[in-house]
Image (cartoon, rainbow, N blue to C red):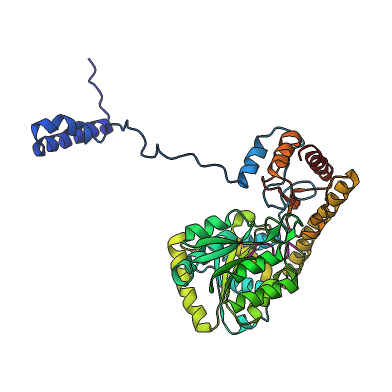
Amino acid sequence: MRPEFTSPSSSSSSSADRRLNALVRHLATPSMVSQTAVAFSPTSGFHGDSVFSHVVRAPEDPILGVTVAYNKDPSPVKLNLGVGAYRTEEGKPLVLNVVRKAEQMLLNDKSRVKEYLPIVGIAEFNKLSAQLIFGADSPAIRENRVTTVQCLSGTGSLRVGAEFLARHYHQKTIYIPQPTWGNHPKVFTLAGLSVKTYRYYDPTTRGLNFQGLLEDLGSAPSGSIVLLHACAHNPTGVDPTLQQWEQIRQLMRSKALLPFFDSAYQGFASGNLDEDAQSIRMFVTDGGECFVAQSYAKNMGLYGERVGALSVVCTAADVASKVESQLKLVIRPMFSNPPIHGASIVATILKDSNMFNEWTIELKAMADRIISMRKQLFDALRARGTPGDWSHIIKQIGMFTFTGLNSKQVEFMTREYHIYMTSDGRISMAGLSSKTVPHLADAIHAAVTRMT
């Protein structure tokens, strides 16, 4: 008869069980022994309900959920105009040539390592980012009144700035435009700020409600924070004129309102980096303070690299230094320090004059294609005799157009034409091509004439 084999692991496990049960019997009363022996057995399984059983399934993100629905649609004519990401004329994602070139340079540099960055990120990236948004000759930079920290794209820059303000600013209310990017209220609320809105878009003119904007900011408590889209307002594509920006600046400074700019589209709106930064530079030139969140997702196509920067313009250099010290205390427990790769790409391009020029050419080509799509869509709707005035399509600027379509019309276009967009009628012009414009124009025409 062969001896029974006992594996070392099962032997040691049962031995441990016996020792633990013996200890329990020694410490417990007789009535407890049978219960605790089982409860304390390291090999006994857990058969109860999950402590998270009460968790309710969250709805899909209203913007990212559009892509989820699009991906499930088997139709060959489906069109995704929901997410703000640039596409080529062939409908493909674009990696800029200058970005590939910069990556190859980084790859060939054998001295590069993967060590942790400082809390504030790459110093060269921060310096170049500040120069890009404020201008290389900015007096604020020259006087060391700007502190810039590397963050996780525009969203992370907004969140870091918001948490700093919630801790160190005397006013805890931020006014955001109505409408605005769907993530704005969530970012600011979770950071600890109270969110209120000011009028911005006029649905009747499909343009700016400038009078409403001035009235709402004029009645905001002194010192309130105000979120401003630097250019290419998301989702409307409606921007103030330079004259209107000057009126906004004067009003805000007279009431000591603190500007917090979200700059997600510098160079991507008009095709000109300086032109798209004019609103910000107006507020910096007057010597006042402001916050600026920058993103390189759109203008360098670095969506997934999460590259951004937060800059705080202060009235004095020593204040800027103290602000930076506190920004570090926000960042450290949030993400400790930022990633190295994407910011290295940006710094490589910005510091080299030839690569910088190549970038501006590619950037203008992207902006020009979007402007061309606007013109083609406007012409296609006019050719079909689609009811209504569609001139707002060519008046608006940037990645998005606020079509004016209602949620029923949007639902109709998705159901009948397999066109996906957010329910507020916002479409990403960057997702269109010359081949798909007729399909979209047909869908809008049908929606407007059949779903009033």
- Residue 450 found in image quarter: top right
Residue 351 as seen in the image, left or right of residue 37: right
Asked if the magenta segment contains residue 376, the reply would be no
Q: Where are the magenta residues, as a range?
A: 262-269
Q: Is residue 48 left or right of residue 116?
A: left
The answer, for residue 261, to whether it is visible in the render is no
Image position, residue 22 (x, y; %): 12, 35
Q: Main secondary structure of the magenta part?
A: loop
* Total labels drawn: 0
Residue at position x 64%, y 55% in the image: 303
Which quadrant of the structure image shows residue 311?
bottom right
Q: Where does the C terminus fall, quadrant-wise?
A: top right
Q: In which quadrant of the rendered view does residue 23 lie?
A: top left
Q: Is residue 207 left or right of residue 184?
A: right
Q: How far from the left and from the top, in percent, is residue 261?
A: 62, 68
336 is higher (above) or lower (below) than 134: above
Q: Answer above or below: position of 424 versus 120.
A: above
Residue at the image point whose x is 77% and y is 64% from the top: 270
